[in-house]
Image (cartoon, rainbow, N blue to C red):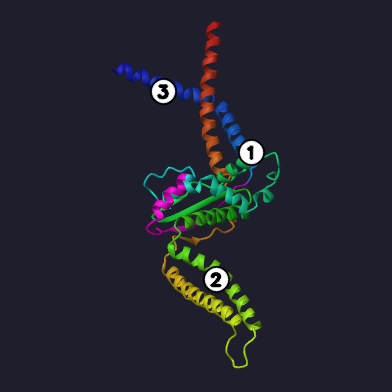
Amino acid sequence: MSQDMNDDDIDIREYVEVVLRRWKTIVFFVIVMVFMAFVYSLRQAPVYEASATVLVRGGGSSSLSQYAGVAGMLGLNLGGGGNIEDLTELLKSKIIAAKVLDDLKLTQRIPGWDNPEIKRQNLISAVSGMVKTPKVSGKVLEIKTVSSDPQLAADLANGFVDALSFYWNELNYSEAQKKLQYIDSELPRVEKDLKTIENKLKLVPRADTGFSLSGQSGVQRDYDIYNSVYIMLKKELESAKLEASKEIPPFSVVDRAEKPFSKSGPKVKLNVIVGLVLGLFVGIFMAFFMEYWEKGNNRRA
């Protein structure tokens, strides 16, 4: 056993001697790898990262089934989820990236993207690749985007938030909001018709006695009907606004993204350290290889 320990000591001593004898080779490869890593970092385009934070709440009682149904049409398999984790899939979906592409007019802002030979699907995939996997903390979602343009990075983050908010709110569209939208669309039409009948009523002659003529009575009846409908819609509008105001928005933006002032990449220090470690491994390997090669030549000689 004592002999084995002595042999181990000799082997370790030989290894150390090889390293010391070939230290110039090791240093050479370390310098080369560090230099290459440094040059590589300098040649890389700067990368800026922007982030936005949103708060997700549950919608109405039917929001889960609506979410699962629409998510299924988007090609997402959410099981029985419908919680905040599912937003990571929705965020990476093509329909979100397509909306960001159109809303921000990226084909006009990013050089080369206006090339008609580039397929729209490729552009959508490129936009989807600009958003990182969101960080989830409770019901808070942090969305991060990257770009070589700091302002574009912030616009992308806010664009993804707006697109996500748009589709999420549609999935959680409540009955009160539907009612409010319907009345908002119908009220101007009824008001226009009422104004038209009112103008007709002014043109119908009255008898000297002050009583309505037969022609006026028909217009008056139409006016009374439309006026009643108009008053009813106005009351319903106020009621719908009150109901909608009591609801908690299912999707709220906590912090919108701002233009970053410092680069997030390339990470020069990290790349240099990787180059240093890699250079050591390569240098030590070459030192032992050269030692083995030299001994082999000496034996043949």
Left or right: residue 12 compared with residue 190: left
Q: Toward the viewer: 96 or 180?
A: 180
Mark 1 lies on a secondary structure that is helix
Whether residue 88 is visible, yes or no, is no
Residue type, label 3? Ile
Q: Position of residue 287 (x, y in %)?
A: 53, 23
Mark 1 vs mark 3: which is more N-terminal?
3
Q: Toward the viewer: 216 or 131?
A: 216
Q: Position of residue 65 (x, y in %)?
A: 40, 51
Which quadrant of the figure has residue 196?
Answer: bottom right
Left or right: residue 98 compared with residue 175: right
Task: Give the residue number, with chain letter if any, for mark 1.
Answer: 39
Task: Give the residue number, with chain letter if any, for mark 3.
Answer: 12
Task: Give the residue number, with chain letter if any, for mark 2.
Answer: 187
Is residue 83 in the magenta section? no
* Farthest front residue in view: 214
Name which residue lies at 46% across and 43% down: 76
In the displayed structure, 222 sits above or below 102; it is below
